[in-house]
Structure formats: C-alpha cells, structure tokens
Amino acid sequence: MTQITRPTPRRLDAFTLASEPGNERQALKRVAGSVAGLGLPEARLERLKTAVAEATMNAIEHGNGNRPEILVEIEVTLAGDEIVVAITDQGGQANAGTGEHTEPDLVKKLHGDQSPRGWGLFLIRNMVDAMDVTTDGQQHTIWLTMRTGGSAHDEHV
Amino acid sequence: MTSMCEATIRELPGAAVIELAGEVDGSAAIVLTGAYERAVTSADAGGAVADGEVSTVVLDFAAVDYINSTGIALIVSVLARARAERRKVVASGLSPHYREIFDITRLSDFIELFPDVDRAVSQLTPPAA
C-alpha cells in the first residue's frame, strides 16, 4: 500500500480584526504581505486578495453582525504548494453569508428579478482553487486554498 | 462608512464620461449614483448636456484601485437604470484583474470594455466632417 505523505503546514501569519466594515482592506493587504516571496503569479495574487476581502466582509457583516468587539480571526498557512487562508467568525450556523445561495444571474438582476447584490460567494468560488466552510459551535470558518503554481481558473485570463 | 470614491464628470457630445477614483464599494453608492444622475441630466441651466441627449455613459476606472462585490452591485444598478433609459454603458481603464471579474460576472456582455478612456471616447465621437 502506498502511503501519501502530506507536508506539514507552516504558519505564515495569524491576526485578528475588529468587525467593522472596511477592515477587509487590512486583511487583504496583510495576507498579500504574508505570501510575498512564495512565487504566486500576479494574477493569482490578485484573485487571492479579492477572495480574502470578500470572505472577510462576509465574516464581518453576516458572521459577527458588524459588531467591532467581536473579532474576525485570520490565519495563513503554507502546506507544500498550497496557501490556505482560514477566516473565522462567531456566527456559527447562523452565518447565512456562506450558506446555500441562488447563483447570481446578471440578466435577472438587470430585469429586477434578483437583487443587484449577492456576488460575494460567487466571486470567492471563482477566485481560488478551493473553498470550504466548517462550523464548530459558534466558530464559522471559510477556508480558501490557492496553489502557488496552480492553473485553476487561469482560463479566465 | 466614509466613501473613498470620487467621481468627475466630463461632458461630450452625446456622451458623458464618469471618471472614478479610489474604491468602488458599498460606500460609493451616493457618489456613483449621484454622478450618473448628473451625467445624464443638465448640470445647470447652461449645461452642455440636456436630459435625454446622453446616449452613452463611459465609466472610467483608470484611477480605481479596489472594487468589491458591493461595488459590482452598484455597477449592476447603474447598468440596469441606463438600459431602462436606453443608454449605452461602456467602461475603460480596468486592470486585468477587474476585467476578469467583469468577464466572470458577465458584465462585459453588456458593457463594452476599452483599455483606456481615449479609445473609448474615440469609438463614440463621430469624426469631424
């Protein structure tokens, strides 16, 4: 039987943010800094930054209800060629931001049949190589995975 | 939240350019919708553009460094209104990353994209006789 050895994750950064609208800009800047030097191509770095910003916005708004005293926790790790960003809020199962959503349909939005909003989760899914969501009690975490040399979604460019 | 978005309007024959700068996010709602409103109506009694005469609105993103999902929603709202008013919307100056976002959201199916505002305007303004 062949054993698959997974690389031990190495923590690149861990920090918290107050749940105030606009703080997602701090998250994307800090995550971008923590992955600098890993060889992530510019286009993929931009995608990761957008995904981090959107997931942090979701945690601030839907998870922690824009309450500054409740912190969003962000951890960045590297395992092999995979950058994993974990963004945790205290919304538990109540965080509807990452629940099942109607896929955004621009034509329906233009005709008023869908709200103009609702792009956040769609953007995240299209920006990174993988997105997972876990809930442990009150802790609700979105996991964003981006391979440093991967090619997923590169067809968009 | 204070808006980090600014808008400058440039009037052209039959068109208006809205030059955006800063961040297009949810806080930009008043700036963006207000700019659209001013762009398509006469700014004052002596304004060069009368209501109904602006057939094309150019959104120039050259000085924009951040667009998020709520900003995309604002752009969708402006586009919906423009289409209802039978006006065309084109965009210029988007970075490659935001061009990709316009592609995956399908905004680029409804908003023609130009590399810069000069090329957008040159496509709109009929050459002098």
Image (cartoon, rainbow, N blue to C red):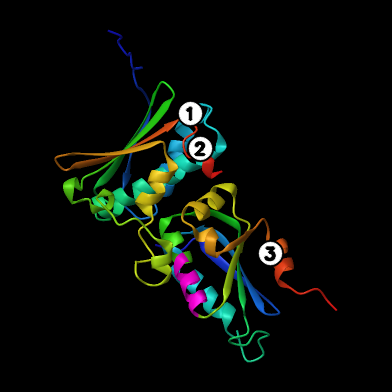
Q: Residue at x 54, y 27 (%)?
A: A39
Q: Which residues are magenta?
A: B76-84
The single residue placed furthest to the right in the displayed view is B129
State the image coordinates of residue B58 (x, y, percent, origin top left).
62, 68
| Residue B79 highlighted magenta (yes or no) | yes
The local secondary structure at tag 3 comes to: helix
Query: Label 2 crowding class (10 Å Cα cut-off): few <14, some 14-19, many 20+?
Result: many
The Cα–Cα distance between marks 3 and 2, rounded to whole angstroms, is: 28 Å
What label does residue B98 carry, if any?
A: none
Label 2–label 1 contact, CB within 8 A: yes
Element class at badge 1 = loop
Callout 1 crowding tier (Cα within 10 Å): few <14, some 14–19, many ≥20 = some
Q: Chain of mark 2?
A: A
The residue shown at (62%, 80%) is B54
Task: Give the mark, 2 or 1, whose residue is nearer the N terminus.
Answer: 2
> Label 1 lies in what chain?
A
Residues tagged 3 and 2 counted as in contact (Cβ below 8 A): no
Using the image as rendered, state which of residue A116 and residue A85 is in the foreground: A116
Magenta run includes residue A105: no
Q: Amino acid at mark 1?
A: Thr
Q: Which residue is mark 3?
A: B120
For residue A44, the mark is 2
Q: Nearer the viewer, residue A138 or A152?
A: A152
Q: Would residue A96 be found to the left or right of residue A86 on screen?
A: left
Determine the residue positioned at 51% across, 37% down.
A44
Above-or-below relation of A36 to A155: above
Residue identifier under label 1: A148
* Residue A154 pos. (x, y %): 52, 38
Q: Relative to A94, is B24 on the left or the right?
A: right
Q: Quadrant of the C terminus of chain A?
A: top right
User: Can the viewer see residue A23 in this picture?
Assistant: no
